Image: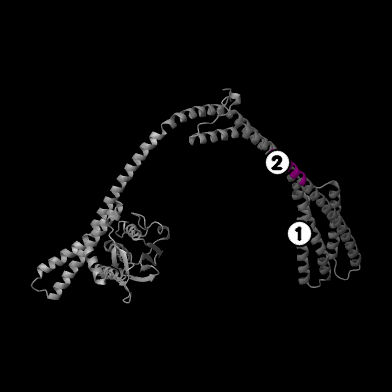
Amino acid sequence: MKRAHSIKARLSFVFLFLFLLVIILGLESLRSLNYVDDASAQIRVRWLPSTRALGDLNNLTTDFPAAESAMLRAVTASERATTDQQMADLDRGIAAAQLAYRQIPHDATEHDLYTRFEKRWSEYRSTVVRARSMPPGTPAAPVIEKDSKSAYDTASDLLGTLTERNLASAREASERSDLVYAQARRRIVLTIFLAGLLVAGAMVHVTRSISAPLVDLATRMHRLATSETNIDVLGTRRHDEIGEMARAVVVFRNNAIDLARNRQTLALQADLLKEKLAEEQRLTLLQRNFVAMASHEFRTPLAIIDGHTQRLISMRDRLTVDELAERARKIRSMVRRMTQLIDNLIGSARLVDARIDLYYHPTPVDLTALLREICQLQRELAPDAQIIMPAETPRFVVQGDASLLSQLFGNLLSNAVKYSPDGGLIEVTAAQEGAHVVVEIEDHGIGIPEKDRQRVFERYYRGSNTSGIVGSGVGLSLVRTIVELHGGAIALDSSEGRGSRFTLRLPRSADQETVTGEAAVVDLASAS
């Protein structure tokens, strides 16, 4: 490869060119700024201080005649002392302004005017001193006063001429500074414009000789990555790094053609491995969920049963019939709770195995009686829960499987109890809408976050705010499967921190008189 044609050499040349361009632009800007600074320095160093000094001289010398007049009119010693002090202060101010003006460089004309002003002012001050030393009423006083006024007028005229000349010169310097600034700005703008053209030319060169070929190679490599092997590669004859890359892409294309022949076999093997991995993950998750739920859910009823049993054994001779019945009822409630947990586990296993339809045996079911029985069961399992179902709810009959419906409503009610801390209110209602029975179960518990509402019916998914509450994430998935198996639909309305409402629509049975409430209860009891 010829090193003179390499990308590194080209880029180095371009960067060196841009670097020199920046230096030239900076030097030209500095030179223009120096012109502006020189013009501004004349105003800053000469004309502004001169104007300030001449302004002070004009102000102080203007006040001096008034002080002189007051001095000549002073009669008492106190008045003369006051006027002497005023004139001394004015003399000090004038001396300071004169010193400041003399320290500033001036041309010959200004220097001559100022020298004449100082001479006339000295003459004026001499006449003032002579007038000061003469007692009031002296015949020569009017002559001295006339000489003093003449000297003052001459000095004032010279100072006025000097001031006008200074202002005119300062104005010319300001206009000259503006002109220099405008010229410097035009030079800088022109330099920037030329630099922009040169940079644009450099960018065009880099784009055409380096960037565009690299983008073309990247596009062709992307097409190769998508298994498009029927492409031509340009630039293989270049003697630089892009040529080497093009030749490497040709090798890559040939290898891609060889790899494509084995892709189908590799894809089949990957699919098999993916299926096996998914199956292993499913089995592991099922085992973990079962162990977690069994350890937490079964421990409580077993402990209660054991406690009541020990109590019966230790106090068998002292317990009354009512106390025995009460403890037996609590033991039976815990047994029914464990039975319900076992049913849920069996239903979850059927759901996981996708074989729940084999256990679907539809018969006419008194839905109202079934709901009342499940509500009572949950009240016994959770005495603190406030589960309310209106007593005037009419009798509704649906075509379905009593065992599956029991698991459906049992899961929903147990969730409402579990996620309603401190025994919150739970309302169960049933009503008819056309050919459907609509059942609503509403709680006022922790609710479901908005981000979780679309996924709560997924298997093993639990809300983000359920940390510390036992559950497997299978219940709502099982509920949706059972509802769909019965040809119904379920909807969720929830607000985090305010509770949830589940609305179920189940088709009514064609014959409302097919089953009695008592039969439904018997079926439910046998199913539980």
Q: What separation in Å lies between label 1 and label 2 (alpha carbons)?
A: 52 Å
Residue 197 or residue 307, whichever sits in front: 307
- Queried whether the magenta region covers residue 187, the answer comes back as yes
Pinpoint residue 163: horizontal percent, then vertical percent.
Answer: 83, 55
The label number, if any, that marks residue 192 in the structure image: 2
Image point (52%, 31%), residue name? 230
Precedes in sequence: disc 1 or disc 2: 1
User: Please, which residue is most extreme toward the bottom here?
Assistant: 392
Residue 95 falls left or right of residue 229:
right
Residue 469 or residue 19, whichever sits in front: 469
- For numbered disc 2, what is the local secondary structure? helix
How many C-alpha atoms fall within 10 Å of the one at disc 1: few (<14), some, or many (≥20)? some
| For discs 1 and 2, the disc positioned in front in the rendered view | 2
Residue bearing the label numbered 1: 93
The label number, if any, that marks residue 206 in the structure image: none
Residue 21 or residue 257, whichever sits in front: 257
How many C-alpha atoms fall within 10 Å of the one at disc 2: few (<14), some, or many (≥20)? some
User: Which amino acid type corresponds to the residue marked 1 in the rendered image?
Assistant: Gly
In which quadrant of the rendered view does residue 491 lie?
A: bottom left
- For numbered disc 1, what is the local secondary structure? helix
In which quadrant of the rendered view does residue 215 lie?
A: top right
**Which quarter of the rendered picture does the N terminus lie within?**
top right
In which quadrant of the rendered view does residue 445 lie?
A: bottom left
Q: Is residue 123 visible?
A: no
- Queried whether the magenta region covers residue 522, the answer comes back as no
User: Which amino acid type corresponds to the residue marked 2 in the rendered image?
Assistant: Ile
Residue 330 falls left or right of residue 253:
left
The boundaries of the magenta stretch are 182-196
